[in-house]
Image: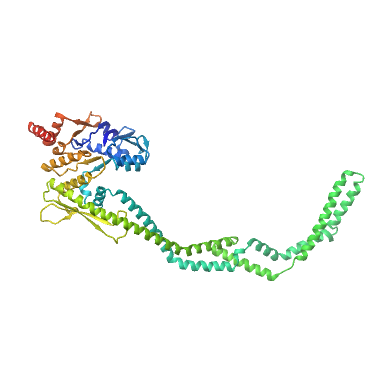
């Protein structure tokens, strides 16, 4: 249960430390005194939405600290243990909100994510808002209440996971089916392009070698003329290059007899003469091999033209045509393999859907079994809350052939009648606001009785109720407080008088700033607050006596 709530610089609260007791605690005070700030702090500490506007003017950050006794909260202790956050039988939660919008959360002084804080909060506190009767008109909310009462969370999580996997499989299948519509045309086109490239023998294409051969044949006359000119210079010109080099070599050899240092140079020149003779010999040999081949040249030109055309068609360089062929073959193989993928995905989707429907059928059976008992308990509470002829029923409509949904194949509907002789009608069609408020309270009390959450918070759920019914509501909350900690924000003296503990919320100002304060009322102070709730601004001896009598009834 909640044992301590500390608030720092949150809205109009500068500094507030509250200790909470077991049983039923009533929170009262004038409208606008700040009761909602206490609930805001509680929701914030449990992972609720944080807004920088919550930080008190002039402060850097707001802070909420919650301390829980987990002696009677086994699911919360197990969650902490599973997440390596356990610290005995107590739990300390701290949440800070900075003025710049930066938020931090801690569980037992260890930083955690907001998602983790919310997950733990579900095991610690259950909050019923003052507009719960409006939400109860919606079928999804009715189904969620039934599931919450029956403890279907684990099964719902399994079902939702199966749905997500099945849905992803179906989406993949849809994409493959869409691709398959164009697959035949694409395959035909790819086959045509592959055959065209294979016919051109691009797989073994050495485009650079082909281009080199074409360049040589196309310039053969120029090459022959050039080689002949160089041979003429070496051998036949006047003077010929070889003759000049030979002459230089002999004269240097002759000089070396008188100056030995020229001998090495003479040898180098003689070596050059030998290399020139070798070069000339090779030039004659290559010249003899050069032969015009107009037919080959024409063939090369045709091949190059075809490769350039293919390159333009495929938007690649000619030398990249072999890679393009490999890519198209791989794409064709993928297209061909889609049929096998579709068949496998269909089998997988069928297996998943079969398992989903199996689990959904189990959940439907459990919902129907739980609905009967819950409806009987709500009917009993309705009759105690001033609707003596009230009757409540829960119908679970199963659609076994419907497409899978995350929450299962059921549509849950709450039916009610408050007058004798009238048939059961959907809760959404009940017109009376007072009846809706009492129905909402009956439903919430009935659902909470079976919950393992140690702390229940009711925020003005008794609005629209008065008189003797309000007293019955107070008694039920007191009985509920014997099993769980109950915190109730109320404006009804009949409800507040039934509480085991009474907190009074007030707003005070010194002319410069306004602050919300909370006081635990006992004795005369509590009697005067009950009297205020009974009689308004002016408290008379009669209202004080009435308040004292109401408090005496609870002793």
Badge count: 0
Q: Is residue 387 left or right of residue 110?
A: left
Q: Is residue 478 left or right of residue 86?
A: left
In the picture shown, does residue 60 fall above or below 192?
Answer: above
* 80, 411: nearer the viewer: 80
In the picture shown, does residue 504 fall above or below 372?
Answer: above
Q: Look at the image and tell me whether residue 228 can be seen.
A: no
Q: Quadrant of the C terminus?
A: top left
Q: How is the image coloured?
A: rainbow
Residue 550: image location, x then y, percent: 11, 35
Picture quadrant where residue 358 is located? bottom left
Q: Residue at x 50, y 62 (%)?
A: 331
The residue furthest right is 258
Picture quadrant where residue 553 is located? top left
In the picture shown, does residue 521 fall above or below 310?
Answer: above
Residue 3: image location, x then y, percent: 26, 34
Residue 449: image location, x then y, percent: 21, 44
Q: Is residue 516 left or right of residue 335?
A: left
Q: Quadrant of the N terminus?
A: top left
Q: Look at the image and tell me whether residue 265 can be seen.
A: yes
Q: Residue at x 84, y 56 (%)?
A: 242
Q: Is residue 299 left or right of residue 57?
A: right
Picture quadrant where residue 505 is located? top left
Residue 309: image location, x then y, percent: 58, 66
* 40, 32: nearer the viewer: 40
* 185, 223: nearer the viewer: 185
* 244, 59: nearer the viewer: 59
């Amino acid at each position: 249960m909640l044992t301590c709530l500390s608030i720092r610089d949150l809205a109009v609260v500068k500094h507030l430390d509250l200790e909470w007791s077991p049983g039923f605690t009533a929170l009262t005070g004038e409208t606008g005194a700040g009761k909602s700030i206490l609930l805001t702090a509680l929701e914030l500490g449990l992972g609720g939405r944080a807004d920088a506007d919550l930080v008190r003017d002039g402060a850097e950050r707001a802070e909420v600290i919650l301390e829980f006794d987990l002696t009677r909260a086994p699911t919360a202790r197990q969650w902490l243990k599973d997440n390596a956050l356990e610290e005995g039988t107590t739990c300390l939660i701290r949440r800070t909100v900075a003025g710049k919008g930066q938020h931090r959360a801690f569980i037992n002084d260890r930083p955690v994510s907001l998602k983790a804080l919310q997950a733990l909060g579900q095991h610690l506190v259950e909050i019923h808002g003052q507009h719960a009767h409006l939400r109860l008109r919606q079928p999804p909310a009715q189904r969620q209440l039934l599931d919450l009462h029956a403890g279907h969370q684990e099964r719902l999580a399994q079902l939702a996971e199966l749905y997500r996997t099945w849905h992803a499989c179906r989406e993949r299948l849809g994409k493959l089916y869409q691709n398959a519509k164009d697959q035949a045309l694409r395959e035909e086109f790819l086959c045509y392009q592959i055959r065209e490239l294979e016919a051109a023998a691009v797989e073994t294409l050495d485009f650079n070698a082909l281009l080199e051969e074409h360049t040589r044949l196309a310039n053969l006359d120029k090459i022959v003329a050039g080689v002949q000119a160089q041979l003429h210079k070496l051998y036949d010109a006047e003077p010929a290059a070889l003759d000049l080099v030979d002459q230089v070599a002999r004269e240097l050899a002759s000089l070396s007899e008188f100056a030995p240092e020229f001998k090495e140079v003479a040898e180098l020149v003689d070596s050059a003469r030998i290399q020139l003779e070798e070069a000339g010999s090779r030039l004659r040999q290559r010249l003899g091999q050069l032969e015009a081949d107009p037919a080959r040249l024409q063939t090369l030109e045709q091949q190059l033209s075809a490769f350039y055309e293919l390159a333009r068609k495929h938007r690649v360089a000619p030398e990249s045509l072999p890679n393009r062929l490999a890519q198209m073959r791989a794409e064709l193989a993928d297209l061909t393999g889609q049929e096998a993928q579709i068949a496998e995905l269909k089998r997988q989707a069928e297996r998943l859907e079969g398992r989903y429907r199996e689990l959904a059928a189990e959940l439907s059976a459990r919902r129907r079994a739980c609905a009967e008992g819950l409806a009987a308990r709500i009917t009993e509470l309705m009759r105690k809350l001033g609707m003596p002829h009230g009757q409540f029923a829960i119908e679970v409509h199963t659609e076994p052939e419907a497409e899978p949904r995350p929450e299962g194949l059921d549509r849950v509907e709450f039916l009610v009648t408050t007058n004798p002789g009238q048939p059961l009608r959907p809760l959404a069609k009940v017109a009376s606001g007072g009846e809706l408020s009492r129905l909402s309270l009956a439903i919430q009390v009935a659902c909470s009785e079976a919950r393992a959450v140690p702390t229940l918070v009711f925020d003005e759920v008794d609005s629209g109720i008065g008189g003797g019914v309000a007293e019955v509501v107070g008694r039920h909350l007191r009985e509920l407080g014997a099993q769980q900690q109950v915190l109730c924000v109320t404006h009804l003296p009949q409800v507040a008088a039934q509480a085991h503990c009474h907190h009074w919320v007030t707003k005070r100002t010194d002319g410069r700033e306004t602050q919300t304060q909370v006081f635990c009322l006992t004795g005369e102070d509590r009697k005067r607050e009950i009297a205020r709730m009974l009689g308004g601004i002016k408290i008379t001896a009669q209202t004080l006596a009435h308040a004292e009598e109401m408090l005496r009834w609870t002793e």
